[in-house]
Amino acid sequence: MALAYILALDQGTTSSRAVLFDHGGRIHGIAQKEFRQIFTSEGWVEHDPGEIWNSQITVAAEVLAKAGLSAKDVAAIGITNQRETTVIWDRRTGRPIHNAIVWQDRRTAQFCDQLKREGHLATVQRKTGLVIDAYFSGSKVRWLLDNVPGARQKAQAGELAFGTIDAWLLWNLTGRKVHATDASNASRTMLYNIHTNRWDEDLLALLDVPRPILPEVRSSSEVYGETAPNLFGAPIRIAGIGGDQQAALFGQTCFARGLAKNTYGTGCFMLMNVGAEAVASKHNLLTTVAWRLKGTTEYALEGSVFIGGAVVQWLRDGLGLIKSASEIEALAASVPDPGGVYLVPAFAGLGAPYWDQYARGTISGITRGTTAAHLARAALESIAYQVADILDVMQKDSGIRVAELRVDGGAAANNLLLQFQADLLRVPVIRPKVTETTALGAAYLAGLAVGYWKDREDVRANWEVDRVFEPRMGEAEVKHRRSRWAEALGRARDWEEHSQIDVKKLT
């Protein structure tokens, strides 16, 4: 066992990665491949499921080859995935009936508004811990069944299968033998009752989703099956599945109630472990399954920021202010502050705690003296402001004062961002030595299932601190900055809805 490794498949929104971990939780190898983002209409975002599968299996083979390893050197595979992204495929042919609808996609926003007008919000929140929003899988499933010719009839006949990306990968990895998901991913569909731990008949009826297309819901840490022998030369056990943010919470070893982490990825996702009892939010946060292990479900409060690191990609690809994402820190650091500029990156609406699908991005406070450096700094600070807004209400909902925030994800390498985050939060921000905590969490879930690690204490011993960012900014300055941010946020709210009203008046 000491010579074996765990292979984590980390299927994200913009790329597929494969990461090899050793028993100390250290990275032994990594491979990554980007894939296309398909924008078919305004607010619509799709992925090609075949391209996702090909990219994921390619990097898995690549990382083993680079490390000079074979299937016999891998104790187990763990899967972590972009959540809510929805795939429906034909059980007989294995072919998707349509592109995957990505979590960012807003095509079902009007249908979600209709459900809220009809008074279903309280029921959905009570059963699922979620708000009604186009973000989640349920309305995406309904759209696919209603808009792909013949899909609903095939679904009712049991000829189609639905899954989030983890289920799609598991199906293909096992040679089309296993159609399953774990509780953390199921809890993001708006179809799963997080209290009964079952698909909910009332919700299935509300969204008109036939039960035969649903995957089996299983634990986050157990042996689901083996890889088809032709994939890696010999079978490998697949033993862990976790939605990316829950996997990151596990990878940060946030096993105790009150421990919280924030992942700075395409979006930002803050989760707090609230233990074995689900905590209902009064401030538009989500109550979600953190993981299910050995028959016990543990829960988390979650706040989701739709545009986190993606604002840096926009500066690079949309405005051309930087050539690579890594350049932003130096550019932003070339000025002492953003010069009164506030950027609200509501490019896909606003997530928690506002859930405003009609908000749009705005830049406030521009003067003749505003430079690219000011915009870069305002963009970085916008990420920290959104995270601070979430932590405020998370502490109110849980009744827990957070003593520290553990951070990970690509933008966690940005020291300027993390220092400003600590300033806003007034608590230490801690970056671990291994920031690939999403993949690490999937590895831990898989390794625990096959005895690679004995228990959570064995896992916890691996966590090491890279750097602690202590608050420096004065309290009065923080209060002023956050007040101005709130004003800028107000200018971005309900923008698209007001715009439509104004156009109607003009015509």
Image (cartoon, rainbow, N blue to C red):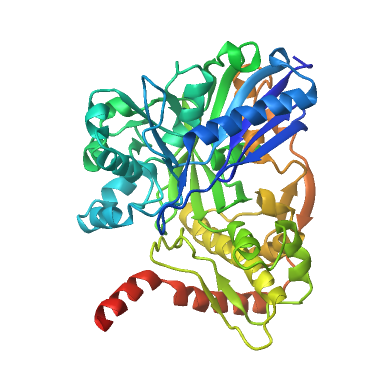
In the displayed structure, would residue 244 be above or below residue 304?
above
Q: Quadrant of the C terminus?
A: bottom left
Q: Name above or below for residue 160 compared with residue 390.
A: above
Residue 45 vs residue 464, the one in the foreground: 45
Quarter occupied by residue 61? top right
Image location (x, y in percent) of residue 353 = 45, 60
Using the rendered view, name the quadrant where residue 18 is placed.
Answer: top right
Confirm whether residue 497 shows in the render: yes
Q: In this orientation, which residue lies closer to the viewer: 502 or 292? A: 502
Q: Image point 29% across, 34% down: which residue?
A: 200
In the rendered image, residue 392, in percent from the top left (x then y), is placed at: 53, 62
Give the image quarter of residue 138.
top left
Q: Quadrant of the N terminus?
A: top right
Taking the spot 68% from the left edge, 22% from the top edge, the residue there is 453
The x and y percentages for residue 351 are 46, 58
Residue under the point 50% across and 53% down? 304
Residue 359 lies, in percent from the top left, at: 42, 67
Q: Is residue 85 left or right of residue 501?
A: right
* 148 vs 438, nearest the viewer: 148
Residue shown at 22% from the left, 30% from the top: 153
Judge left or right: residue 421 versus residue 492. right
Classify 365 as above or below 492. Answer: below
Direction left: furthest residue: 118
